[in-house]
Amino acid sequence: MAALSSSNSFASTFVLFVLLFTFLPAFSNAQLSSTFYNTRCPLAQTAINSAVLQAVAAERRMAASLIRLHFHDCFVQGCDASILLDEQASATSERDALQNRDSVRGFEVIESAKATLEGLCPGVVSCADILAVAARDASAAVGGPSWTVKLGRRDSTTASRDEAERDLPLFTSTLQEHISNFAAKGLNTRDLVALSGSHTIGQAQCFTFRDRIYDDGSDIDAGFAATRKSTCPAAAGNGDSNLAPLDLVTPTLFDNVYFRNLIEKKGLLQSDQVLFSGGSTDSIVREYNSNAVTFRADFANAMIKMGEISPLTGEDGVIRRICRSLN
């Protein structure tokens, strides 16, 4: 019996080894690579960069919108361009999720880049990869860091509004909710604070910060709150969509002033201010406030990590020819 058991064990191990050896090349070919399009579409990143620079030149705020669009894509089903599918393509469009409705922007920039790429190399470059490159180029366009984007993502054929509403951060999120949310995606507290630093650019709608600026018990600088009240009426439903810059000091420049704002209790959103409220992330906020170089490096590294959340690669997914539809 012992000899038979040993023989069976050897045979099982041998079969497993053969299977692993056989399929190893397939796994290797499915990995993301910075040179993925070098042969099949060498002008891919140049075309995307051109579309981004044109859009940001026309509207500086678009840089923040493109970074946010990539983030909101990756946190739902992974980095698969599912956020780009409209309601005609998907009955559960992520665009309709609470965290995205009437706020997520930049679709036309991605479609513009995609149209150009379809002319250069039809059916080659995925919408998911365009999102990743566009976010990098948007950061650089407003003075932020750049980084090497690994490519080879493919596009999903599904979207999930339910998953979007479950996994995307809310403007009311607590620190622990943030930490748990990011940890579920393989991101640590340092990634959380660094990525939140993208709020050094961009704007927020009145309804997202009304309660904070009108709450007398809120941990907010009184003068800062008074300034924001001028464009955000107290009554709900009145001026809900009025915009205010997340960083009042340098609203269109990617820098580390956001962290100084938090230390001074001038975070516009409660979900930002919780990063500096006596919790475990206070020290990271202080570090980024005093060292812009460290913040920029950590932001770039966190964007790389985020951009590699559960991508579809190899034969999984599709390459959409129009990003908003299942063509």
Image (spheres, grey):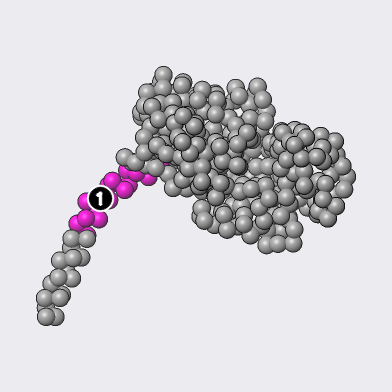
* Residue shown at 67% from the left, 56% from the top: 174
Q: Is residue 233 left or right of residue 291?
A: right
* Residue shown at 71% from the left, 58% from the top: 282
Q: Nearer the viewer, residue 143 or 78?
A: 78
Q: Is residue 29 left or right of residue 240?
A: left
Residue type marked 1 = Phe
Query: Could you say where residue 181 lies in the image, as x and y percent from the top left?
Result: 57, 54
* Residue shown at 81% from the left, 53% from the top: 218
Residue on which disc 1 sits:
23
Query: Could you say where residue 88 lies in the image, as x and y percent from the top left?
Result: 46, 29
**How many residues crowd around disc 1 within 10 Å: few (fewer than 14), some, or many (20 or more)?**
few
| Position of 55 relative to 142 (above/below) | above
* Residue shown at 55% from the left, 29% from the top: 107
| Position of 62 relative to 218 (above/below) | above
Magenta span of residues: 17-35
Is residue 22 one of those drawn in magenta?
Answer: yes
Give the quarter of the figure containing the C terminus: top left
Give the quarter of the figure containing the N terminus: bottom left
